[in-house]
């Protein structure tokens, strides 16, 4: 058996991941056409490359179908309950930086932080008869964050794309989304709450705690770790 390494299958995330491993003596390459999701790892024996979407990698790690995987902190913590029991962080890769934040309309001039949001949410429910809507695809992370902050009167509205536009389109009153520069937020007349940073994320190499490892796999894993540190 060999260790399976899951890597994002396209775009800058794949390119930067390939570059990161190359600097550590491991050459990752796609085999076949761009439509094929197979690859190879040169520089070490016993490691097989699997190309997946970044969103699939947490699930595959948790299921034990891959031993190692590169994906964002946000995706691991959102998709895997009790993620620490299912995966181990091996190394942050230093790219793919993004913050999961809470943002409200700029014209909410009296809403600067979570305490303000809690008060506004209560008033909103009393006035409109339903809870303030927060558009997001990060339900677990946002719910846990707001629970810890004591904010109660809200509902999460699922948004899988163009989340920043939901306020303008009147399908939500505010958003919780990933941002790297904040430009899209400003373009949509949104502002980040002063204490509204839910999570700082970046591309990270993870090890599955549930995948099977025989003696040869464990030896390969130790060599692999040594190469990354060297």
Image (cartoon, rainbow, N blue to C red):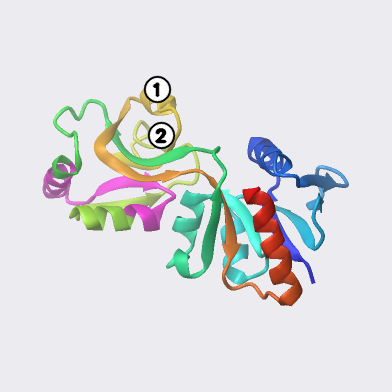
Q: Residue at left 66%, top 65%? A: 67
Residue 89 in the image, given as x and y percentages of width and height: 52, 57
Density class for disc 1 (Cα within 10 Å; few <14, some 14-19, many ≥20) is few
Q: Residue at left 86%, top 44%? A: 33
Query: Quick check: can you spot residue 188?
Result: yes
Density class for disc 2 (Cα within 10 Å; few <14, some 14-19, many ≥20) is many
Residue underneath mark 1: 187
The answer to whether marks 2 and 1 mark residues whose Cβ atoms lie closer than 8 Å is: yes
Residue 173 in the image, given as x and y percentages of width and height: 28, 39
Q: In which quarter of the image is residue 141?
A: bottom left
Q: Left or right: where does residue 146 sit relative to residue 56? A: left
- Bounds of the magenta span? 117-142
Q: Left or right: where does residue 125 sit relative to residue 25? A: left
- Does dot 2 land on a helix, a strand or a loop? helix
Query: Quick check: can you spot residue 172?
Result: no
Front-most of 221 and 6? 221
Q: Left or right: where does residue 33 sit relative to residue 204? A: right
Residue 42 in the image, given as x and y percentages of width and height: 82, 50
Front-most of 175 and 76? 76
Majority secondary structure of the magenta segment?
helix
Q: Left or right: where does residue 6 sit relative to residue 44? A: left
Q: Residue at left 22%, top 51%? A: 131
Residue underneath mark 2: 164
The residues tagged by marks 2 and 1 sit, at their Cα atoms, a distance apart of 9 Å
Q: How many marks?
A: 2
Q: Assign the N terminus to one quadrant of the image.
A: bottom right
Q: Tell which circle, 2 or 1, labels the residue nearer the N-terminal end.
A: 2
């Amino acid at each position: 058996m060999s260790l399976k390494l899951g890597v994002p299958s396209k775009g800058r995330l794949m390119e930067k991941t390939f570059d990161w491993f190359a600097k550590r003596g491991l050459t990752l390459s796609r085999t076949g056409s761009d439509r094929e999701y197979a690859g190879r790892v040169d520089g070490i024996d016993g490691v097989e490359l699997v190309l997946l979407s970044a969103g699939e990698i947490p699930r595959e790690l948790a299921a034990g179908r891959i031993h190692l995987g590169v994906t964002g902190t946000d995706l691991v913590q959102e998709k895997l309950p009790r993620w620490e029991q299912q995966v181990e962080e091996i190394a942050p890769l230093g790219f793919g930086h993004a913050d999961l934040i809470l943002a409200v309309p700029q014209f909410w001039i009296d809403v600067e932080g979570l305490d303000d949001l809690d008060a506004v949410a209560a008033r909103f429910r009393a006035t409109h008869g339903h809870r303030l809507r927060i558009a997001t695809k990060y339900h677990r992370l946002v719910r846990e964050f707001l629970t810890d902050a004591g904010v109660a009167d809200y509902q999460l509205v699922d948004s899988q794309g163009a989340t920043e536009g939901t306020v303008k389109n009147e399908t939500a009153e505010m958003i919780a989304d990933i941002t790297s520069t904040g430009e899209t937020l400003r373009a949509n007349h949104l502002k980040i709450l002063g204490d509204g940073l839910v999570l700082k994320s970046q591309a990270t190499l993870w090890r599955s705690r549930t995948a099977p490892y025989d003696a040869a796999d464990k030896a390969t894993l130790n060599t692999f770790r040594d190469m990354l540190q060297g």
